[in-house]
């Protein structure tokens, strides 16, 4: 979901946990490979301990703040620690809000947040705010109780923790006529209310996770060097009867949903999977203002304007991260004012799955309506900038099993050209492409995940990329060994930049020439007019990710060039253990003879004559990207159907509403830069390279 959007956090993590609480482990790492981070040869690890704070006096500051706030407001420190652990794993990278509008290590929730653009309507992303009705705005509550500005609670970790403690104490007193609970289990209702969820089920999920953390305990050194410990309380017994006194809704608003909440989940039998429906309801009286998905009949039960039936094939499975906790993501998708959803949400700690939108319906997660029409969206609990702190093995296992199940059911190829990250997706316009999310981010282990998808070991999966010797092969698969591929990455969410802890990354940096003296590649849509890219985690424009394929464009020493985003881009690719690519052949396109360039598109909508009178033609927008004559790009999908699902109102109150328009313009999906884009067959020539 990220972009706001994950191995070895840099120091040793140890977590003891019950079934509902993450068991986090990580390897010790000595520092950032500064040379790798620069897109070049590695230097000694001792050159950079800057990504990870060392524990010491400062490393105990956050625990001290937790204990102080607990004493000040009469809240058990275990409650504060468990709430923060479930919300953020005791660390918040960046200053921006999470999926539910929460801030800081305690995830204090603001009353509104920027409107989601995940439905993918073309046009510059809206700056409007959305008020999330029904839940508790804990940020406002904390500011009132402490008599401090909300901005201070967002910016100061100490005040953020104090604010959370004050709110928890206030909620607890409200449940027991002004008295604080006399036992740890008596805090269950206050913790559930603190979740901010409007629905009882989501609030209970959050409280259950927090109490599971208390039972099992947890300890870790965070990415910013804080030594955190939650002492196990195995005998804690939560008082769940308090939940009924919170006045929360029993179920989300889903008046028009196709399936009731009691329906069985559509998941492989080996998964712990529950159907928890996302909201499908109007926001007010305007039937065009509704959330959080569209009813459909994918793949073969779609309705045409003429009253016939047609197909809208499911071609892709999109991997996301939540940028929030599992329970907060479920709560957000259950609120129709959030305008966002996914078909499935997966929990980090134990791999539990919530199905929220049936695969036959269209979830709003990809930021490009055409992609949403043809995709299943899967959210994985976690934060893109925090690496393996969230991306646990149980989550990888469940996600891979779910992907295999869905791919088999809908005929989706099990490769990285159809199993995509949000970071791989286009936008329908230049502005929406630049604003597209970049999750699951630079630390999702694509090699390991695809190995699980294919049921093989990591080394076997890596070898699937092709030959280590180029020979006559022209296709290049980015394929470094994940565990050794440490890159220097910064996070600038909210405007404050910091270098992230050393950890394996899933990409190589690209430069404008064959050497570290050349600048990082500047994407012309992401950075208009810029002469260099950046090392920010959100800057996908100068990154080529594991298992992505490109066409070989040259070699200079240990540097390999590929055709990328209308240019040549270079990455460090020495022979031996540091080799970052493998080679193969395949189908490619180039601009048709006589054309100076071929146009590039972010969607494959039908030509205007295909639309009936009642449906306004969807504009097919040429992006600033082009394919110059002589450049070559891999084909992902041939024979792409140009179509458009016209879904405008909650109740199908417009003529031809919720029907599919099918065009006749043949297109191809290609691997163009970090993202995939479309070209029209009339402008390109297809060939097969050895």
Image (cartoon, grey):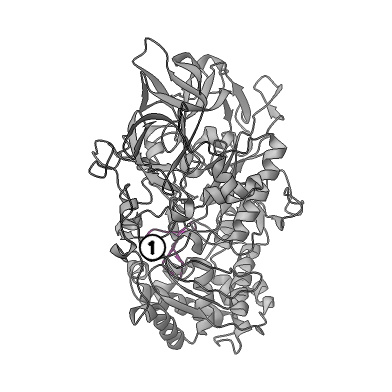
Q: Is residue 108 magenta?
A: yes
For the point 43% across and 68% down, the residue is 91
For residue 312, which quarter of the picture?
top right
Residue furthest to the top: 594
Asked whether, in this view, residue 235 is left or right of residue 36, the answer is: right
Residue in front for this viewpoint, 335 or 490: 490
> Residue 557 in the image: x percent, y percent?
31, 37
Q: Is residue 187 magenta?
A: no
For the point 35% across and 74% down, the residue is 54
Which residues lie in the magenta part? 94-109
> Residue 202 in the image: x percent, y percent?
62, 63
For the point 40% across and 73% down, the residue is 160
Most common SS among magenta residues: loop
Q: Is residue 364 visible?
A: no
- Tell me the residue that label 1 is attached to: 501
> Residue 270 in the image: x percent, y percent?
75, 55
- Residue 78 lies, with reference to residue 607, above or below; the image says below
Task: Kindly state the secondary structure of the residue where label 1 is placed.
Answer: loop
For the point 41% across and 35% down, the residue is 673
Q: Is residue 524 visible?
A: yes
Residue in front for this viewpoint, 212 or 194: 212
- Residue 424 lies, with reference to residue 640, above or below; the image says below
> Residue 346 in the image: x percent, y percent?
61, 56
């Amino acid at each position: 979901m990220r972009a706001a959007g994950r191995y070895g956090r840099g120091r040793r993590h140890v977590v003891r946990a019950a079934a509902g609480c993450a068991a986090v482990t990580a390897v010790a790492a000595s520092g950032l490979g500064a040379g790798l981070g620069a897109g070049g040869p590695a230097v000694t690890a001792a050159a950079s301990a800057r990504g990870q704070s060392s524990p010491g006096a400062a490393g105990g500051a956050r625990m001290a703040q937790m204990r102080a706030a607990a004493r000040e407001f009469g809240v058990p420190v275990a409650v504060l620690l468990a709430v923060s652990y479930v919300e953020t794993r005791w660390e918040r990278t960046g200053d921006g809000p999470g999926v539910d509008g929460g801030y800081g290590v305690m995830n204090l929730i603001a009353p509104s947040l920027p409107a989601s653009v995940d439905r993918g309507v073309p046009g510059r992303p809206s700056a409007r705010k959305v008020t999330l009705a029904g839940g508790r705005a804990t940020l406002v509550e904390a500011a009132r109780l402490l008599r401090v500005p909300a901005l201070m609670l967002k910016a100061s970790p100490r005040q953020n923790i104090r604010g959370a403690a004050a709110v928890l104490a206030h909620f607890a007193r409200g449940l027991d006529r002004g008295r604080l609970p006399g036992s740890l289990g008596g805090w269950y209702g206050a913790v559930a209310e603190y979740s901010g969820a409007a629905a009882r089920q989501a609030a209970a999920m959050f409280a259950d996770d927090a109490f599971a953390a208390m039972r099992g305990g947890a300890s870790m050194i965070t990415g910013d060097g804080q030594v955190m410990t939650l002492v196990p309380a195995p005998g804690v017994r939560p008082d769940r009867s308090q939940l009924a006194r919170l006045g929360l809704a029993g179920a989300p608003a889903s008046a028009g949903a196709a399936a009731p909440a009691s329906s069985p989940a559509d998941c492989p039998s080996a998964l712990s999977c529950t159907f928890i429906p996302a909201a499908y309801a109007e926001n007010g009286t305007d039937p065009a203002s509704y959330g959080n998905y569209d009813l459909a009949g994918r793949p073969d039960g779609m309705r045409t304007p003429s009253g016939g039936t047609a197909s809208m094939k499911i071609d892709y499975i999109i991997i996301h991260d939540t940028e929030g906790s599992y329970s907060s993501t479920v709560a957000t998708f259950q609120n129709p004012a959030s305008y966002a959803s996914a078909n499935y949400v997966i929990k980090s700690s134990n791999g539990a799955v919530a199905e929220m939108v049936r695969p036959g319906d269209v979830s709003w997660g990809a930021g490009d309506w055409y992609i949403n029409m043809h995709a299943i969206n899967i959210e994985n609990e976690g934060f893109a900038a925090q690496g393996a702190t969230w991306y646990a093995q149980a989550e990888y296992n469940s996600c891979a099993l779910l992907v295999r199940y869905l791919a088999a059911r809908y005929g989706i190829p099990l490769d990285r050209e159809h199993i995509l990250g949000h970071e791989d997706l286009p936008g329908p316009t230049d502005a929406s492409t630049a604003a597209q999310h970049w999750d699951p981010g630079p630390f999702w282990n694509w090699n390991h995940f695809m190995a699980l998808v294919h049921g093989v070991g990591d080394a076997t999966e890596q070898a699937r990329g092709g030959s280590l010797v180029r020979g006559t092969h022209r296709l290049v698969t980015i394929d470094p060994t994940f565990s050794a591929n440490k890159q220097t990455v910064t996070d600038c969410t909210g405007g404050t930049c910091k270098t992230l802890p050393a950890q394996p990354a899933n990409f190589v940096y690209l430069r404008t020439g064959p050497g570290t003296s050349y600048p990082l590649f500047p994407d012309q849509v992401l950075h208009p007019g810029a002469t260099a890219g950046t090392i920010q985690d959100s800057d996908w424009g100068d990154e080529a990710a594991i298992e992505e394929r490109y066409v070989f464009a040259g070699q200079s020493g240990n540097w390999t060039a590929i055709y990328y985003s209308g240019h040549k881009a270079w990455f460090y690719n020495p022979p031996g253990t540091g080799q970052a690519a493998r080679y193969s052949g395949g189908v490619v396109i180039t601009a048709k003879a006589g054309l100076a360039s071929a146009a590039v598109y972010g969607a494959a909508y039908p030509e205007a004559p295909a639309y009936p009178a009642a449906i306004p033609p969807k504009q097919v927008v040429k992006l600033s990207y082009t394919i110059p004559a002589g450049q070559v790009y891999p084909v992902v999908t041939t024979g792409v159907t140009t179509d458009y699902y016209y879904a405008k109102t909650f109740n199908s109150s417009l003529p031809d509403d919720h029907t599919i328009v099918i065009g006749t313009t043949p297109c191809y999906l290609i691997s163009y830069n970090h993202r995939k884009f479309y070209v029209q067959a009339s402008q390109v020539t297809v060939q097969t390279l050895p």
